[in-house]
């Protein structure tokens, strides 16, 4: 078996929230283990390859992490968490081996993933997430010269389009489903946080040569064996655009599998937390996008608070934590405005046709889900949500299309090879 | 420009930038389909962050590995389509 680690605080997820939590906890004198399933810390927003310098914005925190004394375990996918007495026992699969971390406190900073809405043709190779395409470019993919349609919703679209353009991809169309008036009023509110507004303007400048339309959405993708064209509409006009890639992301959804497994209270797709980021489970804290989508700065503030609280360092550093409350409150307001401005329109929720596959693991079309009234029923009747991704893609889509609530979560949270579990058994 | 290295994809040598993930290397070298779905459809990566499992390939004999979560190593053998 792999390593057995002991810590005072285990932090799960090395994005902005988890890195901040690990730094503050470790600097307060706690023994900290930081687990992440990616190859380098930074999270999706600061994705970079191991050995490369992190992006400038991430640099201060990641440098601080290496100096903090926290033990960083990357490429480790957490698959189980249980409480044994007063200690949490976390198990992760890393390089085919099971690693065990025991800790009295846990900080859940598992972040968010992209929301994928099913539409005809979305399973064709070459149809990627918007964040997905950006991640591939940041992971070394040479897509230069390819023609991409970027579609969906949210600030990530412009950021992805800018990354793709920077990597030599020809972004031939950007379709933001939200109407202009919603985005304009959101933009006005950003005047309170000029940094974010400038970021938006910078992204728009970076893709100046590409047509960007609000109130447009991708309706279908077509091609033989791979995507060759996108059908884009605003409800009245219909455009057919030749392309090699369709990069479609419809917003972000929190990664709630671990907090659900642990038994934290969840409301409206977010982990319920108190003043010091404590969840309803004793010894468990949560920070960042799992507490609601509100961006990296909010995640950092929450991560700092959670790290100080989890390390039991509030007595000495309570003032530090309270200083962060204002940043957190501003961030949460920004998150609420973001959610309203980029709410999905009914046409987008109705893009899947009866024959459109909704569950991509088990190839279940929407028509087979007609009788199901919950994710549980869908699983039992059709195997939707029971494949390798365990409903991470179709579950989020079906909660929006059909109003299904999430089913209970059981370990393993990710597929684990039998040999790994077998070799874990200690000799008797 | 990054150093190049060579991996083998379905028996074919592919030059990739050192430090690329397997998913990035395959997509960049013009391989759109990584696996075949349970009903026989070609599939390629979707999320590229370890969530969707659409990019599963066989890497050095280990089946069902997520190409987006694995770094290329010199001489690595990748098989698509399971």
Image (tube, rainbow, N blue to C red):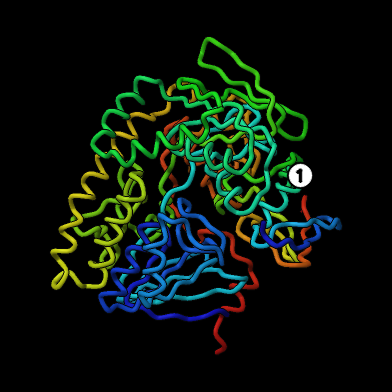
Residue at 61% x, 44% y is: A167
In this view, the residue in front, B71 or A225, is B71
Residue lying at the far right in this picture: please name it.
Answer: B11
Residue at 75% x, 48% y is: B29
Q: How many labels does the image show?
A: 1
Name the quadrant containing residue A331: top left
Do we see residue B63 in this rendering? yes
Judge the density around disc 1: few (<14), some (14-19), many (≥20) Cα neighbours within 10 Å.
few
- Percent position (x, y) of residue A154? 43, 34
Residue at 72% x, 29% y is: A228
Of all chains, the one bearing label 1 is B
- Percent position (x, y) of residue A416? 59, 64
In this view, the residue in front, A335 or A53, is A53
Picture quarter with the N terminus of chain B: bottom right
The residue that label 1 is drawn on is B30
Secondary structure under tag 1 reads loop
Please indicate whether residue B43 sits to the left or right of residue A159 in the image. Answer: right
Residue lying at the far top in this picture: please name it.
Answer: A236
Location of residue A220 with respect to A395 vertically, above or below = above
- Percent position (x, y) of residue A92? 51, 69
Please indicate whether residue B5 sits to the left or right of residue A181 in the image. Answer: right
Please indicate whether residue A375 sits to the left or right of residue A140 in the image. Answer: left
Location of residue A416 with respect to A173 vertically, above or below = below
- Percent position (x, y) of residue A229? 69, 25
In this view, the residue in front, A371 or A325, is A325
Residue lying at the far bottom in this picture: please name it.
Answer: A428
Residue at 77% x, 59% y is: B78
In this view, the residue in front, A49 or A124, is A49
Picture quarter with the C terminus of chain B: bottom right
Please indicate whether residue B80 sits to the left or right of residue A16 in the image. Answer: right
């Amino acid at each position: 078996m792999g390593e057995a680690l002991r810590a005072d605080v285990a932090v799960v997820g090395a994005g902005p929230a988890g890195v901040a939590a690990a730094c503050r906890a470790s600097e307060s004198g706690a023994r900290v283990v930081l687990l992440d399933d990616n190859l380098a810390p930074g999270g999706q927003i600061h994705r970079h390859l191991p050995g490369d310098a992190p992006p400038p914005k991430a640099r201060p925190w990641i440098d601080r992490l290496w100096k903090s004394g926290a033990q960083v375990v990357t490429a480790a996918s957490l698959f189980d968490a249980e409480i044994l007495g007063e200690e949490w026992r976390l198990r992760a699969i890393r390089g085919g081996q099971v690693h065990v971390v025991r800790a009295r406190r846990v900080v859940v900073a598992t972040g968010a993933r992209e929301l994928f809405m099913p539409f005809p043709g979305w399973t064709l190779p070459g149809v990627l997430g918007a964040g997905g395409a950006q991640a591939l470019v940041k992971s070394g993919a040479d897509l230069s010269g390819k023609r991409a349609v970027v579609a969906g919703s949210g600030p990530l679209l412009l950021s992805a389009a800018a990354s793709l353009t920077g990597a030599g991809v020809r972004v031939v169309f950007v379709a933001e489903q939200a109407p202009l008036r919603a985005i304009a009023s959101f933009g006005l509110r950003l005047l309170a946080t000029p940094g974010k507004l400038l970021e938006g303007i910078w992204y728009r400048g970076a893709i100046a040569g590409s047509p960007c339309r609000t109130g447009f959405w991708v309706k279908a993708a077509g091609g033989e064996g791979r995507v060759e064209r996108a059908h884009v509409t605003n409800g009245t006009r219909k455009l057919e655009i030749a392309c090699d890639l369709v990069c479609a992301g419809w917003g972000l959804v929190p990664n709630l599998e671990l907090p659900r497994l642990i038994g934290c209270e969840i409301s409206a797709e977010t982990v319920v937390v108190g003043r010091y980021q404590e969840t309803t489970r004793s010894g468990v804290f949560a920070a960042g996008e799992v507490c609601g989508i509100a961006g990296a700065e909010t995640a950092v503030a929450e991560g700092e608070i959670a790290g100080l609280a989890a390390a039991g360092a509030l007595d000495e550093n309570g003032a530090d934590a309270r200083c962060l409350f204002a940043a957190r409150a501003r961030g949460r307001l920004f998150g609420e405005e973001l959610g309203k401005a980029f709410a999905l329109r009914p046409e987008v929720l109705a893009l899947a046709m009866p024959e459109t596959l909704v569950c991509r693991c088990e190839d279940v079309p929407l028509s087979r889900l007609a009788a199901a009234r919950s994710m549980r029923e869908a699983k039992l009747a059709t195997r939707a949500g029971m494949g390798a991704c365990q409903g991470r893609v179709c579950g989020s889509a079906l909660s929006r299309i059909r109003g299904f609530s999430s089913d209970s979560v059981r370990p393993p949270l990710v597929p684990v090879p039998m040999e790994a579990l077998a070799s874990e058994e200690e000799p008797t | 420009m990054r150093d190049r290295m060579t991996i083998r994809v379905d028996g074919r040598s592919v030059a990739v930038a050192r430090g690329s993930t397997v998913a990035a290397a395959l997509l960049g070298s013009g391989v759109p389909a990584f696996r075949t779905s349970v009903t026989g459809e070609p599939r390629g990566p979707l999320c590229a962050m370890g969530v969707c499992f659409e990019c599963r390939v066989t890497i050095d004999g280990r089946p069902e590995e997520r190409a987006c979560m694995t770094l290329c190593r010199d001489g690595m053998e990748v098989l698509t389509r399971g």
